[in-house]
Image (tube, helix red, strand yellow):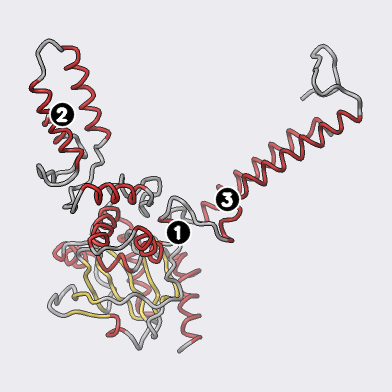
Amino acid sequence: MRFFARRSPLAGDAFVPGFGMTRHSSVESRDSGFERASPASGLLRVIFMVLLVFAGVAHAQAIEPMPFANHAQELRFQQLTRQLRCPMCQNETLADSNAPIARDLRNQIFKLMQQGRSDQEIKHYLVARYSDYILYDPPVKPGTWLLWFGPLLILLGGAGVVLVAIRKRKREGIATTTVDDSVDNGEDW
Amino acid sequence: MNRLWPFIGFMLLVGLFGFGIWWNTRHDPNAIPTPLLNKPAPAFNLPKLYEPTQTVSKADLLGQPYLLNVFASWCVECGVEHPVLEAAAPTLGVKLVGYNYKDAPADAKAWLAAHGSPYALLIADESGQTAIDFGVYGAPESFLIDAGGVIRFKHIGPITPDVLATKLKPAIAAMLKDAP
């Protein structure tokens, strides 16, 4: 079991037992529970093994472990890095990315956290250097109004078209609730 | 006319996608606009590549404009822009400062020995720590910094002959016109 956890292709070469990322320690604890399990549960064993292998793959983009002060800080770090975009590979979060710059930025975020900076301050720090692109959630400002309110505009436009169509039908005396397919109303499309 | 509407809608979509393709040939979709443009360059203090005991700071370079070119031996596109920079360096009008990014000094020196060096000065940022302050996220990147230490232009990606002629040279000319 441990073999899978440690050797998953991207899991990182710097896995130090008992030194950080809980996902490793959770694998370890499950592992020891598994050893104690009765031999009767053969199928369960297989399922469990398969699940663990996939767990290894899912976490394959694991980050090198960091010496977090406590679990809460680690959770905060993971939450924060999931909200930030890797500038090099823009479809990946800083938490997921293996790009060198993502690793550097994770280390920098970790350092800033140790200095007691808040999430907001860390975001400001990154935005000052990498612009809003670093944020997955773009701020509401004149440049992003179209992005934020565009869908609403389109929705309103659609509602307008529907309204006009309904009024037209009413004026022409066509029932809006029943549509008879056998009648050719002249609309080929 | 009713029958034409779907066709008109289709043509609008074709136009939109065509515009997207055209736009992407003109713009690098991976280039992130730097918020540092027309702002003072971040302070730095980095060792020289060839004399690591000596450091160069932002203050040391004040007084004359320079082009800070971020490069690395592991960076493929740096090899693309290298001959362009070598050819252009003497007539560029600004000092060319090489910023060796996340590179082993030995690799960097071997790379420069093989390709030649257009740089008047070479500084090394082995950890990439200072580069974060510059908003660097890869190589090559180039910053045009004026005599007052303000970033006047940034280019992400290799400096091709086209970029040199249409972007970098006009930016240098505008900068020198402002403050010769």
- Toward the viewer: B97 or A163? A163
Pinpoint the chain carrying mark 3: A
Residue B77 appears at what percent x and percent y?
33, 57
Left or right: residue B42 compared with residue A57? right
Per the image, the residue denoted by label 2 is A30
Earlier residue among tags 3 and 1:
1
Per the image, the residue denoted by label 3 is A148
Residue at 54% x, 57% y is A140
Secondary structure under tag 3 reads helix
Earlier residue among tags 2 and 3:
2
Secondary structure under tag 2 reads helix
The answer to whether tags 1 and 2 share a subunit is: yes
Q: Are marks 3 and 1 in contact (CB under 8 Å)?
A: no
- Toward the viewer: B25 or A28? A28
Earlier residue among tags 1 and 2:
2
Q: Is residue B10 above or below residue B43?
A: above
Residue A46 appears at what percent x and percent y?
18, 16
| Numbered mark located on residue A132 in the image | 1
Residue A86 appears at what percent x and percent y?
35, 52
Left or right: residue A135 compared with residue A49? right
